[in-house]
Image (spheres, rainbow, N blue to C red):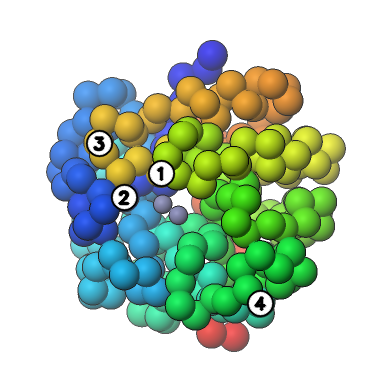
Amino acid sequence: MKDYKIDLHIHTNVNPHAFSTLEENISAASKKGMEIIAITNHGPALQDTPHWWHLVNIAILPDVIDGVRVIKGVEANILNEFGKIDINQRVYDHIELVLAGFHVVDEYGNIDSIEKNTLAILNLIKKQKADIIVHLGNPIFPVDYEKIVKAAKENNVALEVNNTSLGTITRVGSRNNCKAMLEFAKKEGCKISLGTDAHYSGHIGEFQRAIQLLEEVDYPENLIINSSIETFEEFLKLRQELRSKKVDS
Ligand SMILES: [Zn+2]
Ligand SMILES: [Zn+2]
């Protein structure tokens, strides 16, 4: 089983349902020999968001801390079928990596509509507002994987395999959906991102369930953006060129 040293989805305890500080997370990542970690706290539509100043001010952090490259990111919430996300232009301008996904938020109703959910993701992808679409396996937000995979491939957006979704506590029932997504993604040659969605420092870099699934579908290593520093940097550079400049357009 490959040991991935890049984790692109991590929360700190400014989201109160996460338990480790930024420094605890970085120290744990450093001890584990992680090369790159992305700090991706929740956007304002969720109750546990930090003040948006925190999301902007992450930009003051050095690029490398304790030998670990720290990517300043956010996990945005999808607000409607037009692909609107919940971060403002200031945050959008200052962060390096935009994750976006469905969470149960007041602004997004009819969550079980496959048509609405698929349209929301397709618009988000086509408008180039997010670099990685996260935890699409969540069975409470059904989507059309074939359409999403095709759009993601065409627009160079990565789809996430979220290690936490494959466990027994959060987004239970995601595994078969993730497998279906990966089968379409393999056929299309779509980029995949691995995220632990760690809410505790000890979980950083723990990708076992995700890797097992990738091995089951024999997913090509060169399409996994976490596979090497060079692969990730190439993805990030391309995304920064492609990403829309205006979050509200
Ligand atoms: Zn999430
Ligand atoms: Zn998350």
Q: Mark 1 to mark 3: distance in Å?
A: 10 Å
- Mark 2 or mark 1: whose residue is earlier in sequence: 2
Nearer-the-camera pick, 188 or 68 = 188
Numbered tag placed on residue 11 in the rendering: 2
Residues at badges 1 and 3 in contact (C-beta under 8 Å)?
Answer: no
Q: Is residue 149 above or below residue 225?
A: below
**Residue 18 falls left or right of residue 5:** left
Q: Position of residue 128 (x, y in %)?
A: 63, 68
Q: Nearer the viewer, mark 2 or mark 4?
A: 4
Q: Is mark 2 within 8 Å of ligand 2?
A: yes
Of label 2 and label 3, which has the lower sequence position?
Answer: 2
Residues marked 2 and 1 touching at CB (< 8 Å): yes
- Rendered image: mark on residue 81: 4
Dividing the picture into quarters, in which one does residue 89 lie?
Answer: bottom left
The quadrant the C terminus occupies is bottom right
Q: Is residue 67 left or right of residue 77?
A: left
State whether residue 72 is above or below residue 231.
below
Instruction: Sort mark 1 into few (<14), some (14-19) or many (20+) by Cα contacts within 10 Å.
Output: many
Horizontal side of residue 3 vs 38, given as left or right: right
Read off the residue under disc 3.
201
Label 4 near ligand 1 (CB < 8 Å): no
Quote the CA–CA distance across marks 4 and 1.
24 Å
Q: Is residue 173 visible?
A: yes
Residue hosting label 1 = 197
